Image (cartoon, rainbow, N blue to C red):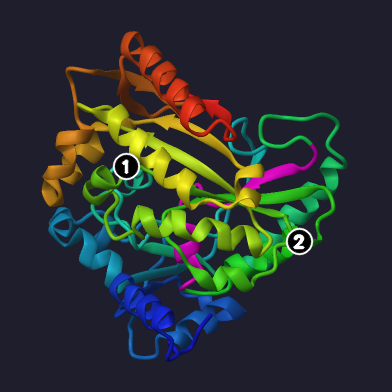
Amino acid sequence: MKEDCGEEDRETEECNATNRLLQVSTIYHEPNVMEYKRGREILGRYPEATRIKVPSHWNIPILHGNEGSIERWTEIKRTVLVLGVKKSLQCTPYARSCDFVAPSHASGCAMACSYCYVPRRKGFANPISVFVNIEQICLHIERHATKQGQKPKATQADERLWVYELGTNSDCSVDALIGDNIRDLIELFRRLPNAKATFATKYVNRDLLGYDPQGKTRIRFSLLPPRVARVVDVRTSTVAERIGAMNDFVEAGYEVNINFGPVIYYDNWLEEYAELFEMIDEALSAQTKQQLAAEVIFLTHNERLHEVNMGWHPQAEKLLWRPDLQERKVSETGGENVRYKLSIKRGLVEDFCRLLTERLPYCRVRYAF
């Protein structure tokens, strides 16, 4: 992690972006975080921050239970950090972007994408919570991967290696601004002979270019049409910045894919996606195109999140909350969400994939739903 911003124009711009994203002034922490090296390191990075001890990183009533926090949604994300210890360590089988979901190294985010599913469980505030027992997390993943042995057959996630998702509850590129958990995880997978890591991101953190993944980490840059992203992708890197970074990450040793998600249906949506595909095609090098694959995930929303969003960003809900087009759906974890009606969605998925194949024929679709 950079301690200062340097004098180059790009470094100055990146420093300014980081400062806009994170200005930590309050740290809620479990009592024992100082027992961990990572806890001491992170607290040392913010010596001026007010420290408040809490029994649990998950249940902080003044944050998660305070309805008045909605009006300070983005301010809290910028100024508040939570430190805790991850208690439950397990690698959960999954069958889309990965083979297994790794134990979370963090939860929550400094960015504020209005469709994010993590706040559905957290209540009225969702800042970054970082877990300081990263050695235990890495050891659990290593033992799990060792137990799997060589992958016996190809899966949707990868033909040869077991794939572990790192970023289900946070954005790893932003987490890397706080501490070295992501560096540690990328170094772990670099030496695991039978496994690779993956995560989706909406933030361009060029510090990751120096992590030397050696092909063992797959980054999926999440992309939406720029006009829509300006509404729903709050406090993220611009779509142009994300596309512009893809070649650099390939050259730095990452596998780089695209996450087309969430795909949002609105008037003239396909025309705007055609323009997005053109941006991608013009920007990517032959090397990046050769290894490119994508996942296509149509919007899933949630009534509780809709209510939270109406308190701080009602403009986004004009795109996301469409009762005339949506129906209720019970998720795999038992939560009740809303999705586009199946009678409509089938055609939308077909139209999207057809256009993608026409405009980016080299981009393999790993899955679409």
Residue 161 inside the magenta-drawn segment: yes
Magenta span includes 69: no
* Residue 81 % position (x, y): 37, 70
Q: Nearer the viewer, residue 244 or 94?
A: 244
Q: Secondary structure at mark 2?
A: helix
Q: Nearer the viewer, mark 2 or mark 1?
A: 1
* Kind of residue sitting beneath label 2: Arg
Residue 24 percent coordinates (x, y): 33, 78
Q: Which residue is mark 1?
A: 225
Residue at label 2?
190
Q: Secondary structure at mark 1?
A: loop
From this viewpoint, is residue 107 visible?
no
Instruction: Name the residue type under label 1.
Output: Pro
Q: Residue at x 62, y 69 (%)?
A: 183
Magenta residues (range): 160-177
| Mark 2 crowd level (few <14, some 14–19, many ≥20, 10 Å Cα) | many
Residue positioned 21% across, 67% down in the render:
75
Of 88 and 195, nearer the camera is 195
